[in-house]
């Protein structure tokens, strides 16, 4: 595996042994969910010889390998005992002097000062100094086979006194990087490009979690670019943008082949520019004239289009209203109760097979569903007395269905009206644009648009449309909150997103969530993510939620509080070479691509 070998002893400077192994428990009372969380973490403590270069190196992300003698059951073929190395990730260091252990505030000031002088002068000189190295198990061990490292899953614990070694740069590359994969960032502490299986990263859904200013939209935009590159023209990404950040972050892609939909009035350059957020770090790289030219091109090319959402939840005859009406006839045993019960079951089947939301007006249903519902109602009418109240009610519904309406035509594209359903059909079509941004600054509108789009998308996928579709939900707490209600449409959007996360990968429909408040997310949805990026999250409870949801060692997660903008803790069950190994990375700056494109088109 090269001249470095499996370990890096830093020229003989690094020598360490395991002092002990412990289990820590972290607990927090309810923080947004009204429930406490308790997370247990295993941790090893090494005692390393004090050396300033070693101390500085251990402050950077790194891995250590602790020797472990194996019994016959753990060796290949069950032969004689062998030796392996358990891989741990360093989570913190603490330089220690022997006299520190005896010093406390009860000592007189003069004696404390004498102790402190002795301690300070002893660093690097006295044999009574060492470094406590805290490290978390990765769940892997490594053995050498023919000069190359072989990593396998292991639940073994190391033995006290066992020697420990720093994993070398090349061994770390072999441990984490997928051969022939797509680079998503540079591994901090090693200057190695982390390569992953980008198809698996997107296929099994991903999350981007970080506080305001950590670069969530920047990183998510990079994931969008890499996904589309990997799909090679056989895919579309649909971004549901609440904060107006993605039109600029993906300005080049939007101008050269994308479409921006919005229920807002964005038909002129000024209103379009005022609605979108320009990152401060881009202000010095893009002039106002360049932005106006870009926005003008979008408007002139017809890439900014209105989105009609209708009046969902605001009255009218919806599937839910129709079902409630029929239940009234059934429960009160009125004339036609039996027919009402039969029709209820037929409507449920139609809604289930079509992935339909119950708060969608019947005239806005897709053509197939309208036809099936009309047929079911017509057959029911044939068995009713034409003087009964149920006959009158169903006749009114049938007239609405057969009358169609502008929104109903818009769903199927007949009138040219743009609805979430028509956008879903566009996304799976062979001539679909690679990028669609749905800008909905009002959270309620965002929930309406996303739930209807996802329901229609899954319906189309189940009926044979194979084109890949990626869905990005920015400010995900608006779509899948922990507490949901029907009146603000959080229940409907949460159920739709859950369906996408559970069923999507079977139908080439994928999802990326970005949020700053993980504690406010639907737990069922959160646990469907197989890859996630975590940056600084100031709230202790948020960090515990991530640790609990993804079985992540909290001591590793705690280090995210030290990360700078663009630095992330990346963990994946599917896309990295080893499963669920946390790695700290510096991701490329998406704004560099945007600025370069503006320079190119302006020259």
Image (cartoon, helix red, strand yellow):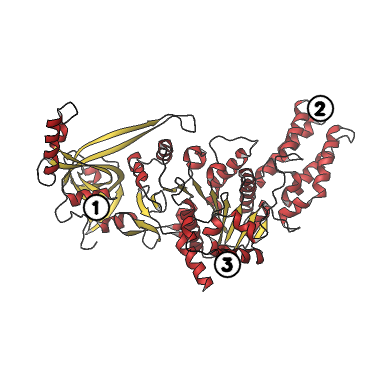
Q: Is residue 576 above or below residue 131?
A: below
Q: Nearer the viewer, mark 1 or mark 2?
A: 1
In this image, 396 relative to 180: left or right?
Answer: right
Q: Which mark is residue 334?
A: 2
Give residue 221's position: percent from left, percent from top.
49, 57
Question: For numbered disc 2, what is the local secondary structure?
Answer: loop
Residue extending farthest to the front is 110
Q: Which mark is residue 167?
A: 1
Residue 479 visible (yes or no): no
Tag 2 or tag 1, which sits nearer the N-term?
Answer: 1
Q: For the image shown, how many numbered marks are present on the structure?
A: 3
Which quadrant of the view contains residue 115?
top left
Q: Nearer the viewer, mark 1 or mark 3?
A: 3
Residue at screen point 82% across, 49% down: 403
How packed mark 1 is, by other alpha carbons closer than 10 Å (few <14, some 14-19, many 20 or more), is many
Give residue 400's position: percent from left, percent from top.
81, 45
Disc 1 from disc 3: Cα separation: 45 Å
Cβ atoms under marks 1 and 3 closer than 8 Å: no
In this image, 365 relative to 31: left or right?
Answer: right
Tag 3 or tag 1, which sits nearer the N-term?
Answer: 1
Relative depth, front residue between 206 and 133: 133
Give residue 366's position: percent from left, percent from top.
71, 50
Relative depth, front residue between 366 and 373: 366
Tag 2 or tag 3, which sits nearer the N-term?
Answer: 3
Relative depth, front residue between 506 and 43: 43
Question: For numbered disc 3, what is the local secondary structure?
Answer: helix
Disc 3 from disc 2: Cα separation: 61 Å
Q: Is residue 603 above or below residue 111?
A: below
Q: Quadrant of the N terminus?
A: bottom left
Question: For numbered disc 1, what is the local secondary structure?
Answer: loop
Instruction: Residue under label 3, please give it.
Output: 256
């Amino acid at each position: 595996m090269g001249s470095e070998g499996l370990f890096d002893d830093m020229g003989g400077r690094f020598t360490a042994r395991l002092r002990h192994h412990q289990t820590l428990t972290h607990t927090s009372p309810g923080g947004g969910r009204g429930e406490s969380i308790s997370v247990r973490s295993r941790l090893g403590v090494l005692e390393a010889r004090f050396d300033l270069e070693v101390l500085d190196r251990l402050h950077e992300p790194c891995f250590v390998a602790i020797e472990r003698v194996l019994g016959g059951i753990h060796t290949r073929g069950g032969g004689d005992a062998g030796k392996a190395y358990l891989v741990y990730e360093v989570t913190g260091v603490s330089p220690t002097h022997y006299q520190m252990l005896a010093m406390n505030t009860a000592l007189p000031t003069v004696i404390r000062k004498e102790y402190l002088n002795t301690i300070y002068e002893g660093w690097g000189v006295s044999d009574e100094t060492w470094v406590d190295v805290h490290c978390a198990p990765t769940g892997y061990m490594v053995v050498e086979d023919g000069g190359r490292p072989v990593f396998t899953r292991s639940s073994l614990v190391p033995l006290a006194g066992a020697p420990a070694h720093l994993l070398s740069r090349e061994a770390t590359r072999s441990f984490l990087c997928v051969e022939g994969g797509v680079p998503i960032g540079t591994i901090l502490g090693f200057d190695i490009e982390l390569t992953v299986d980008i198809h698996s990263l997107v296929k099994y859904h991903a999350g981007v979690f970080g506080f305001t200013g950590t670069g969530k939209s920047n990183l998510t935009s990079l994931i969008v670019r890499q996904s589309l590159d990997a799909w090679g023209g056989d895919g579309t990404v649909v971004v549901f943008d609440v904060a107006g950040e993605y039109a600029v972050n993906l300005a080049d892609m939007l101008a050269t082949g994308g479409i921006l939909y919005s229920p807002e009035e964005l038909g002129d350059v000024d209103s379009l520019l005022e609605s979108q957020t320009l990152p401060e770090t881009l202000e010095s790289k893009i002039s106002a004239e360049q932005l106006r030219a870009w926005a003008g091109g979008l408007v002139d090319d017809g890439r900014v289009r209105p989105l009609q959402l209708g009046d969902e939840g605001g009255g009218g005859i919806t599937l839910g209203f129709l079902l409630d009406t029929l239940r009234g006839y059934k429960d009160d045993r009125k004339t036609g109760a039996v027919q009402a019960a039969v029709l209820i079951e037929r409507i449920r089947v139609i809604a289930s097979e079509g992935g339909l939301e119950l708060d969608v007006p019947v005239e806005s249903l897709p053509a197939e569903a309208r036809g099936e519902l009309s047929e079911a109602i017509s057959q029911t009418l044939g068995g009713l007395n034409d003087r009964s109240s149920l006959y009158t009610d169903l006749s009114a519904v049938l007239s609405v269905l057969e009358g169609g309406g502008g929104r109903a035509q818009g769903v199927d594209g007949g009138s040219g009206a743009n609805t979430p359903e028509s956008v879903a059909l566009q996304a799976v079509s062979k001539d679909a644009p690679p990028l669609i941004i749905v800008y909905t600054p009002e959270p309620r509108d965002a929930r309406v648009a996303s739930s209807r789009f996802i329901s229609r998308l899954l319906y189309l996928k189940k009926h044979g449309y194979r084109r890949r579709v990626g869905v990005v939900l920015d400010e995900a707490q608006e779509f899948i909150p922990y507490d949901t209600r029907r009146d603000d449409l959080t229940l409907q959007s949460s159920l739709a997103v859950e369906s996408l996360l559970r069923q999507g990968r079977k139908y080439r429909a994928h999802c990326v969530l970005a949020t700053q408040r993980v504690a406010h997310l639907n737990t069922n949805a959160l646990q469907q993510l197989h890859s996630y990026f975590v940056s600084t999250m100031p709230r202790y409870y948020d960090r515990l939620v991530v640790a609990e949801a993804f079985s992540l060692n909290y001591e590793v997660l705690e280090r995210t509080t030290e990360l700078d903008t663009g630095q992330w803790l990346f963990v994946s069950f599917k896309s990295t070479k080893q499963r669920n190994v946390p790695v700290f990375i510096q991701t490329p700056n998406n704004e560099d691509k945007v600025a370069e494109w503006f320079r190119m088109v302006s020259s």
